Image: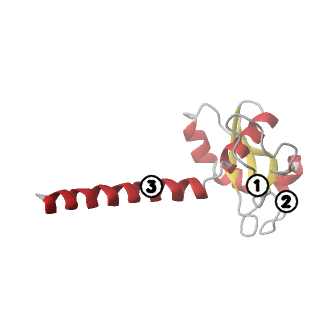
Amino acid sequence: MERQTMYMLAVLVLLSVQQSYSVETYSLSYNYFDEMAQSYCASKGSGWVFAIRRDCEKAPRCKEMCNNAKHEILQSIGNQRNSVSCFDAFHIVKRHPVLKANPSKQPDSGKLNLSTHGYGSNGCTWRPNHCGPNYCCCKAY
């Protein structure tokens, strides 16, 4: 009986570690840049708006990226529109200071954290394969 209890305990610990590891791995690598991008694009546009990731060193212009995603974009809204275009682009600086958690008070108040750079419509034609915008704002119309 003691051996079976130890085995069950070991399995529970292993499952707990595996679950904890996958959650921590996800939370450490996921930092809400996509949500920030969608919020930025939504604040600049109207109607159906989409933020698309752009690898600034290996990507085409945002104009082409929006056109390349046309089928997926239109399908995601049940083909309620016919066309897609880029209307803005911006860069989220991903290396930034990490502030303390703020569950009830505001620790690190007044300290710099995130920064972004908006390109406006000029970002839609930013040179391909060249850093600049790392998100494209597309709209369906």
Mark 1–mark 3 distance (CA, rounded to whole Å): 38 Å
Quadrant into which the N terminus falls: bottom left
Residue 62's label in the rendered image is 1
Which residue is at a point 37% across and 54% down the rendered structure image?
Answer: 16
Which residue is at a point 85% across and 53% down the rendered structure image?
Answer: 123
**Closer to us: 98 or 137:** 98
**Closer to us: 54 or 71:** 54
Quarter of image, res 12: bottom left
| Residue 33 visible in the shown view | yes
Residue 46 at x, y percent in the picture: 76, 31
Quarter of image, res 105: top right
**Closer to us: 109 or 19:** 109
Amino acid at circle 2: Trp
- Could you say whether the residue bearing mark 1 is in a helix, strand or loop? helix
Q: Tell which circle, 2 or 3, labels the residue nearer the N-terminal end.
A: 3
Quarter of image, res 14: bottom left
**Residue 12 located left or right of residue 115:** left
Residue 66 at x, y percent in the picture: 70, 50
> Which residue position holds label 3?
20
Q: Tell which circle, 1 or 2, labels the residue nearer the N-terminal end.
A: 1
> Which residue position holds label 2?
126
Q: Are the residues flagged by discs 2 and 3 in contact, CB closer than 8 Å?
A: no
Amino acid at circle 1: Cys
